[in-house]
Amino acid sequence: MTTVGELVQEAVDLMNSGAYERSVPPTAAAIDLTVRKLTEKDTFSELECSRFIKDNWSLITFMGMPRALPLELSIPFAFKKIMPSFNSLHGALEIVSLVVTETLKVRQMPTEFSFNSTGKFEIKKDKLLLPSGLVCGLLGSVIFHPTNKGEEIGEMYWISISDFKMFVSELFGRDDLAERIMRFYQE
């Protein structure tokens, strides 16, 4: 069986090579495996997966899209599940949750989505472009989650959280470090 650490390692390798779309399936699988461990369930749950993303939203946005700009919600394709919640960042939470859950269903990132390098959501050529840092934020939600304490990854893998660059092997399950860094920037 594949471990969370192996999935994170695969996603980081793909992300570091610029293959953001290809890094989404192992990232989504790492989220799913984390949720299964957390809930002690053996099957995929779209609701639990969405709840995990919502519960970790501040870390995901801090790491993955700190400057994401508002998105108008006239989405030009078939995903009609995107209904912005009251007090959400213009539907961003719903979009990210949808990308992860749909990726888990079809085992690849849905073709209606792609990535850009601008750090914001954009609609171009009937595709919703996501901030490329989003994968890093999603990986952070897995890496720092206490459920994954004790996971293993190669020693030369690192991840950035704002100005801090750290080895992933030291971060599994260390939500205290993520919270400390976020507090540092809020003060």
Image (cartoon, helix red, strand yellow):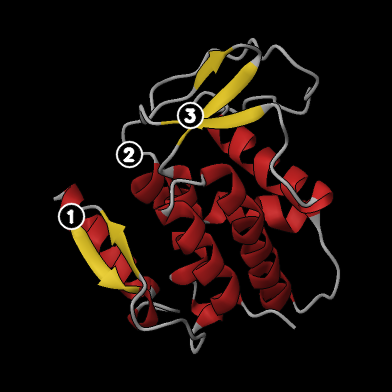
**Quadrant in the picture for residue 169:** bottom left
On the question of residue 114 being in view, the answer is: yes
Q: Position of residue 73 (x, y in %)?
A: 60, 14
| Residue position marked by numbered label 1 in the rendering | 163
Secondary structure state at the residue bearing disc 2: loop
- Between the residue at mark 3 and the residue at mark 1, the CA separation in whole angstroms equals 24 Å
For marks 3 and 1, give the one nearer the viewer. Answer: 1
State whether residue 82 is above or below residue 142.
Answer: above
Given contact means CB atoms under 8 Å apart, are the residues at marks 2 and 3 in contact?
no
Looking at the image, is mark 3 or mark 1 earlier in the sequence?
3
Q: Nearer the viewer, residue 55 or 95?
A: 95
Q: Which mark is residue 66?
A: 2
**Quadrant in the picture for residue 181:** bottom left
Secondary structure state at the residue bearing disc 3: loop
Q: Which amino acid is tagged 1?
A: Asp
For marks 2 and 1, give the one nearer the viewer. Answer: 1
Looking at the image, is mark 2 or mark 1 earlier in the sequence?
2
Which residue is depicted at the point 48% across and 29% down?
A: 89
| Residue position marked by numbered label 3 in the rendering | 89
Q: Which mark is residue 80?
A: none
Which residue is depicted at the point 49% across and 86% down?
A: 152
Q: Which amino acid is tagged 3?
A: Leu
